[in-house]
Image (tube, grey):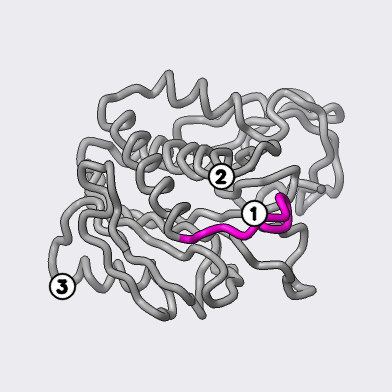
Amino acid sequence: MTIHNTLFVGKVLLHFTQLASTNDYAFDLLQQQKPIEGTVILTDHQYRGKGQMGNHWESKANENISVSIIFHPSFLSPKEQFYLNIAISLAVRNTLAHFTHQKVQIKWPNDILIQDQKVAGILIQNLISSTKMQSSVVGIGINVNQSTFSDSIKNATSLHLSTGQIFRIPDIVQQLCQQIEANYLLVKKGKYKLLRTTYFQHLFRFQKWADYELPQSGNTKGKIIDVLENGRLVVEHKDMKGLKTYQLKEIQFVL
């Protein structure tokens, strides 16, 4: 597979029949050398894929996209690292919107939804020094042609299930690399306001009352007000005074 119409993302592309984890392979590369920025690790079958907080990512062989991309965002300080999350989330969202007319949204902090069902997940792992970002491994899983999911996977869909079409994996990888490069360059140019504005336009449940679950106090009505620079979610609650901020796993969406 060859990536066209990019400056650097995918110019080095390592394609494997199977890997345990593309993110793990990327980190192994980083320990051995400094791969050029935009190096892509792609596999037809990822059999020990990772989600956030150690969750498992299910992906059937030859039906989906499992990919990791290496970046060296030394222009970002550690406190600005969530802008990389914003850029990648928008890139994945835009890629999927290119192949479907259905509503595609970003669910904080790292999922992409089609019609409120999860179609893609993102796992960004950063190597950070005290003052700057050293390297980032951006792992992305996209459900493309998979038609069935195990009972343990809730609320999942794929491009095929949502459109009825069968897609060519290389076409989607090509679009993904172009979108990621374009959005990464916006971060590099410091276009934070533009990125945030676009992010909120596509953020699931932004400024809408909906049901959430808090581990300590159960169900609550909430409205997403903001996402801070550090990635924390800001929520207004009907039954609480003041705005509350949450990290991953401190609040759950009730779907």
Q: In this view, does 5 lie to the left or right of 238?
A: left
Quarter of the picture holding the N terminus = bottom left
Q: Would you say residue 71 sits in the magenta stretch?
A: no
- Residue linked to disc 1: 159
Is residue 199 in view from this perspective?
yes
- Residue linked to disc 2: 96
Q: Residue at x 25, y 51 (%)?
A: 38
Q: Do the residues labelled 2 and 3 touch (CB within 8 Å)?
A: no
Amino acid on which the number 1 mark rests in the picture: Leu
- Residue linked to disc 3: 32
Mark positioned earlier in the residue sequence (2 or 1)? 2
Amino acid on which the number 2 mark rests in the picture: Leu
The residues bearing labels 2 and 3 have C-alpha atoms spaced at a distance of 34 Å
Mark positioned earlier in the residue sequence (2 or 3)? 3
Start and end of the magenta stretch?
160-169
Q: Do the residues labelled 2 and 1 touch (CB within 8 Å)?
A: yes
Q: Nearer the viewer, mark 2 or mark 3?
A: 2
Amino acid on which the number 3 mark rests in the picture: Gln
Is residue 129 in view from this perspective?
no
